Structures are given as structure tokens and as C-alpha cells.
Image (cartoon, rainbow, N blue to C red):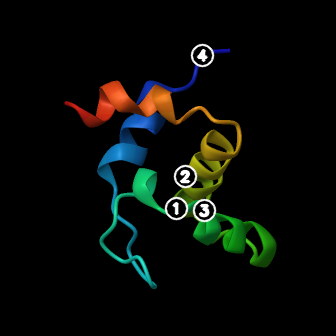
Amino acid sequence: MLPDSKLLLQLVEMQMPFGKYKGRLLCDLPVSYLEWFNRKGFPEGKLGMLLQTIYEIKLNGLEHLLVPLKKK
């Protein structure tokens, strides 16, 4: 199954709307912060789904998939 390109684009364009890393692109969030969400629970809705997605991408060493999108 191919990743949804619109979803991946959102990971390189959308900024974290709150918290310690407010204003940082979702794809640039540190793994430790994503691990914290994984333990405490991801937010509801679209943001939570995007955070879970970037967490899985980083956990599985697939960040290279985002490099061409970041260059756009």
C-alpha cells in the first residue's frame, strides 16, 4: 500500500499548534516528544492522526520518504 501523498504533504507543511514545540513542523518534532504522546495519548482528530503517522514514520526509519516533499 502506498502512503497517501496528501497526508505526507501535511506532515511537512503543518506546524504544531500548541505546547513545547508550538510552531515547529510536524515532521521536525523530536522522537522523544512523539514517544511522550504515544505514552500519554495522542490528541483527538486530524492532529492526533498526523502525530501518530509521523511517530510511525520515525519509529520505522522512513523519514527519507519526506525529504523530497520538504524540498518543494
Q: Residues within 10 Å of mark 4 (few under 14, many from 20)?
A: few
Q: Quadrant of the N terminus?
A: top right
Three-letter code, disc 1: Leu
> To which residue does mark 1 refer?
47
> To which residue does mark 4 refer?
2
Task: Assess whether mark 3 and mark 1 are in contact (beta carbons under 8 angstroms).
Answer: yes
Give residue 48's mark. Answer: 3
Three-letter code, disc 2: Leu
Q: Earlier in the sequence, mark 4 or mark 2?
A: 4
Residue depicted at x 44% and y 26%: 5
Compared with 20, 50 (above or below) is above
| CA gap, disc 3 and disc 4 | 21 Å
Task: Assess whether mark 2 and mark 1 are in contact (beta carbons under 8 angstroms).
Answer: yes
| CA gap, disc 4 and disc 2 | 16 Å
Residue 45 percent coordinates (x, y)? 59, 62
- In the image: residue 53, left or right of residue 24: right
- In the image: residue 63, left or right of residue 11: right
Residue 39 percent coordinates (x, y)? 80, 73
| CA gap, disc 1 and disc 2 | 5 Å
| CA gap, disc 1 and disc 3 | 4 Å
Q: Residues within 10 Å of mark 3 (few under 14, many from 20)?
A: few
Task: Assess whether mark 3 and mark 2 are in contact (beta carbons under 8 angstroms).
Answer: yes
Instruction: Inspect this view and state whether residue 44 appears.
Output: no
Q: Is label 4 in a helix, a strand or a loop?
A: loop
Residue 47 percent coordinates (x, y)? 52, 61
Q: Earlier in the sequence, mark 3 or mark 4?
A: 4
> To which residue does mark 2 refer?
50
Task: Assess whether mark 2 and mark 4 are in contact (beta carbons under 8 angstroms).
Answer: no
Q: Is label 3 in a helix, a strand or a loop?
A: helix
Three-letter code, disc 3: Gly
